[in-house]
Amino acid sequence: MHPRFTHRFKALRDGFAMDRELDAEVRFHIEMETEKYVRQGMDPAAARTKALRNFGPMEKHKEEVRETRGVSWLEHLTQDLKYGVRTLIKSPGFALLAIVTLGLGIGANTAIFSVINGVLLKPLPYDNGDRLVLIQQTAPLINRPNFGVSINELYDYRAQLASFEGIVEFHQMNFDLLRRGEPDRVATGVVSPNFFDALGIKPILGRAFVDTDDDEGAPAVLILTHAYWQTKFGGDRGIIGQVFQMNDRPHTVVGVLPPVPQYPNEVDLYMPTSACPFRAAAERQLAQNRRPFLVQVFGLLKRGASPATAAAEVATVAAHFKRDYPDVYRPALGFHAQTANVLEQLTARARELLLILLGTTGLVLLIACANVANLALARMLRRDRELAMRSALGAGRGRLVRQLLTESLVLAVAGGAFGLLFAWSTVDMLTKFVERFTSRTGEIDIDPGVLVFTLLVSVVTGVLFGTFPALASRIDVANALKSGGKGTSNTAGRHRLQSALIIAQVAVSVVLLVGAGLLLVSLYRLQSVDPGFKPERVMSAEVFGNFTKYPDALATRTLYLPSARTTRTRFRRYLGGGDECRAAERASARPDAIPDSRPHLRHAGCQADGRCARRQHEVLRDARHPASSRALVHRARS
Amino acid sequence: MSSRSRLDLLQGTLDLLILKTLALGAMHGWGIAQRIQQMSEDVLRVNQGSLYPALHRLEAAGWIVAEWGASENNRQAKFYRLTKTGQRQLREETELWEQMAGAVARVLKAETI
């Protein structure tokens, strides 16, 4: 082994032993020198003094020796760490204030970053996640950024796109699954049989869907998600082959999925398209209707196929639609198609928001830094004497700066630990908030990546606010010692630093305040928007119905609610010929008038986009729930 | 120590002198300082404090090794000894020094400037 290396290794292994050795060596030297002078006839005490003077500043020389070992930084670090912790414990007020201030700043950043990490940075958790693209049709001229893809269009894409290995469809329905007569409302993903292959998901039990599952009249089959299997069936491995009633038909469970997050929506179970009564009904109308039923479509790019080529192909096919069916794709729609990265699409609405939040918390952390730096500067005033003493004892300026920086780092890392606790306790709240903007929140977690981020932020924070007191550590030793602890040194420079910090703090605060103010104003405006009705005595109720029996009866019943003054019931279902809405109205004022006034059901006009015409201030804006009927009940005055 | 007659040593020179001193036999730190002073007839005075960093530097470089042993007055002392690479280093540095000293001397002896 190279001698330099062995030397260093030895030094690292037994630094303290080497220190003792050095002490002994120096002691021997001083003794020899003293004896020399004693032999020359000097008084022993004087001889010793002379020997010591000849040697010069002992600690400085010892320090130089230690530095030749090349590992002294490690010792310095442990020394500084110990010392830093000790000084901080001695001023608990300052330490606590700094740790809490930094902790809140770091914690906010950690929480936001854990969301960004889970939503924006992590790749899709599928084998083929990076090759998935969404096929999107838009009609911007009628303000429909998402026009949906119809079954006919899907089939055309499947036939004509060359860059894709597989093109799959998805739509979500809510059905009742009957377990021994007990209904269970299940969110059901209705997918084409190649859906799981395209995503790269293999069932952990049973099988995936196969093409024959999708044949017309094929026995209906189900694949359960892991979560549903666990919660409703306790992970029973005998689930495969069990039969449940759904939509008045027997459905057989053929598989269970592994515990992976689901896209595009989290559902309870999956069925092939042939098993969905509405999708199947639409299938029979394909010839008469170009756009009878809308689904989500995404495709798996062939290996090596470029996304740009794929996008061009999709655009070309869509252009052919317009040419071949000018009645359907009227120029007034501005219809066209494009591809979108699935991950980007899933997170598009959240991206900007999250980045703004990260920027905001970054500014908050900056303010926290400036605050703590100011505190530390003020504290430096009282430490002049200590620092002067240390530099008189042979500590170089670099050494002092390092000491102060280490102290700051100890503070910052402690703040980081506190921040982690803070982030950990708030990330759920934040996740709930972000759920409004993206479905991709299942992977938000404080994982190793986030921990590294926190550590990094803590260290940067420590250096950032630690630099200021360290810069101010230039000390006039003689003066500081003479003044007996009343800090006098370099006050002008320190004042300038403090002023600069305060100016920066105020500047950043103003930016934040303006931003927050704007947000508040928007919120206020949003809340004072006139919805066009008086919401005080309006109640909205949602009733799940069995799709195979069209729930006219329900409409009639709700009209007879005795406490209601007027009711309005609206139905939505996904059936051929576009969405159909029915509105039942009873405008009569008094319950006793009901028996003879048979409520009349009538078809309400439906717009092409599937939304019922808004009449008389309907509030049913979120009635897009495909399987629900909503009754809007105007309660009677009590 | 401000006397001009007793020169403080330049850094690299001290290393060279230590190596030379040790070429004459193993010695402890204090002895090295004394020997340099004696051999230079009291002209060169080693800054005693900077002797030890130099010794440790040379040890780290592998040119000398240290061993504890009994001193002339029977006390434990750390003795430094030249290694093989140290001997080579001494030869090289001596050569370098002579070249430089000769060059400086030639410049100083030049008749006209």
Image (tube, rainbow, N blue to C red):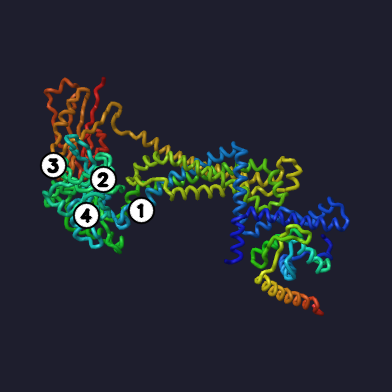
- Which residue in the protein does label 2 denote? A225
Q: CA distance from mark 3 to mark 1?
A: 39 Å
- Which residue in the protein does label 3 denote? A249
The residue located at (43%, 37%) in the rendering is A520
Residue at mark 4: chain? A
Query: Which three-letter amino acid code belongs to the residue tagged 1?
Result: Pro
Which one is nearer the viewer's eye here, A578 or A53?
A: A53
Q: SS class of the residue under badge 4?
A: loop
Looking at the picture, how far across and down is residue B45, in whole percent?
80, 64
Query: Which three-letter amino acid code belongs to the residue tagged 4?
Result: Asn
Q: CA distance from mark 2 to mark 3?
A: 21 Å
Query: Which three-letter amino acid code belongs to the residue tagged 2?
Result: Thr
Query: Which three-letter amino acid code belongs to the residue tagged 3?
Result: Arg
Q: Nearer the viewer, mark 3 or mark 1?
A: 3
Looking at the picture, how far across and down is residue B7, in whole percent?
80, 65
- Which residue in the protein does label 1 denote? A123
Residue at mark 1: chain? A
- Closer to the chain start, of discs 1 and 4, is 1
Q: Are marks 1 and 2 on the same chain?
A: yes
Q: Is residue A528 above or below residue A77?
A: above
Q: Is residue A585 above or below residue A22?
A: above
- Which residue in the protein does label 4 denote? A194
Which residue is outermost to the right? Answer: A41
Q: Which mark is residue A601?
A: none
Q: Residues within 10 Å of mark 1 (few under 14, many from 20)?
A: few
